[in-house]
Amino acid sequence: MDMNQPSSIEAAVRSSANAGRERSIGAILIDAGRLSVEAAEKIIREQKAKGLRFGDAAIGLGLLKQDDIDFALARQFDYPYLSAGDGALSSTLVAAYKPASPMVEQLRALRSQLMVRWFSDDTTRRALAVVSAERGEGRSFVAANLAVVFSQLGERTLLIDADLRNPRQHKNFKLDPRTPGLSSVLSGRANGEALIRIPSLVGLSVLPAGAVPPNPQELLARPQFVRLIEQVSKSFDVVIIDTPAADIAADANVVAARAGASLVVARRDHTPAPKIHALTKDLSGANALVVGSVLNSF
Ligand SMILES: Nc1ncnc2c1ncn2[C@@H]1O[C@H](COP(=O)(O)OP(=O)(O)OP(=O)(O)O)[C@@H](O)[C@H]1O
Ligand SMILES: [Mg+2]
C-alpha cells in the first residue's frame, strides 16, 4: 500500500467528464430520490450548453429548488449499512461498513454516472463486466462494493464472480467455498438456486464462482453463459460481473462481450498506461463497450 497516497478510487464515465463537484451534487440527489436520471441528463446538457454550474442549470430549468441543492451540500443521507462489529461480511466491503467514507462517496458518484450512461430499463443494458489488465488491481473490490451501493439504492442487484481462476467474492460475502456457483451453472450442474441472497444487504444477491474448473475460458464461451445473462437481466436491475486479469487469459474479453459493457479498473502508479490502452482496444474489438474507468489508489 502506498502510504503517501490516500486510499481512493477516481471514476470517469465517458461523456460526462464535467466538473466533479457539480456532478456529485447530481449524484447525491439521484441517490436521495430527489432527482430522476432523465432530469439529471437534461441538467447536464443544459449545463454543458450554457457553461453553468449544475445547481444553477437545475434551478433555471425548474427541475430542482435551492432546498435540494442545500440538502445535497449538507449531505444528509441515510443508507442501509452494517456496524463495524458485525462480522457477517468481510471488512473489504467498505460500502457496507463505512458508508460515510470518501471512498464510498466516490463509489456512489460512480454508480450515478453508470446509471446515466449505461444501466437502463432495457434488459440488454443491465450487465457490466469489471475488468483490469493485471492481477491485484482491485477488480473484485470495485465489483463487490459497486454491487453493494447499487443495492443500497434499492436496485435489485446481482454480483457474479466470473473469475473462475482466482475467485474472491465467496470470501467477501463469507460464503462456503464449496457452494455451487457459476462453474456449476455453466456445466449444467446447478441453476437459479446457486444465486445466494445476502440477508444483511436487502436487494443484493451473489452468484459465487463455484468450484475452480480446469477449463474456465471454454465454460465462459458456452451458450449457457449467454442464457444466464439473459435470464438474470430479467430479474435484476443491475448485474455486476467480476473477471480474471485480462493479462492471464482471454476470459475477461469473453465476459465483457457477453455483458455488453465494461468498466476498466487501473491501479494508480502501478498499471502501465500502454496496458490500459491495449485492454480498452481489445474490449472495443470484442464489442464490449467501455462505459467507464476507475483509477484505484491503495
Ligand atoms: N481502493 C482500495 N482500498 C483498499 N483496499 C483495496 C482497494 N482496492 C483493492 N483493495 C485490496 O487490495 C487487494 C487486491 O484487490 P482485489 O482482490 O480486489 O484485486 P483483483 O484485481 O480482483 O485481484 P485478483 O487478480 O487476485 O483477482 C484486496 O485485499 C483488496 O481488498
Ligand atoms: Mg479478483
Image (tube, rainbow, N blue to C red):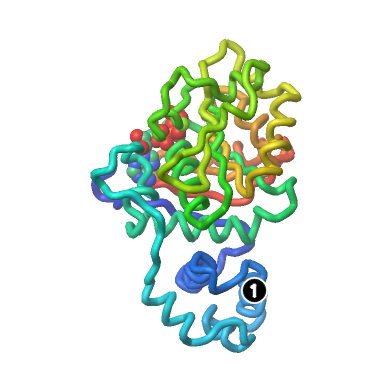
Figure quadrant of the N terminus: top left
Depth check: give the residue in front, 87 or 221: 87
Residue 21 visible, this orientation: yes
Query: Where 197 sits versus 115, above or below?
Result: above
The residue indicated by pointer 1 is 39
Asked whether, in this view, residue 227 is left or right of residue 95, the answer is right
Q: Residues within 10 Å of mark 1 (few under 14, many from 20)?
A: some
Name which quarter of the figure residue 70 lies in.
bottom left
Above/below status of 6 relative to 44: above
Q: Is residue 274 visible?
A: no
Residue drawn where x is 42% and y is 78% of the image: 71
Residue drawn at (61%, 82%), measured in percent from left and top?
63
Residue 154 % position (x, y) = 53, 55
What percent of the width, then of the height, locates residue 142? 46, 43
Instruction: Determine the secondary structure under disc 1.
Output: helix
- Give the image quarter of residue 34: bottom right
Image check: 258 left or right of 82? right
Relative image position of residue 135 (x, y in whole percent):
45, 29
Whether ligand 1 has any atom under 8 Å from the Cβ at mark 1 is answered as no
Numbered-mark total: 1
Q: Which quadrant is the C terminus positioned in?
A: top left
Q: Which of 272 and 126 lies nearest the eye of the viewer?
A: 126
- Residue at 26 percent across and 47 percent down: it is 84
What type is the residue that disc 1 sits on? Ala
Q: Please identify the residue farthest to the top as the structure is shown.
A: 214
User: Image height check: is 101 above or below 210?
Assistant: below
Q: What is the x, y in percent for residue 288?
A: 69, 41
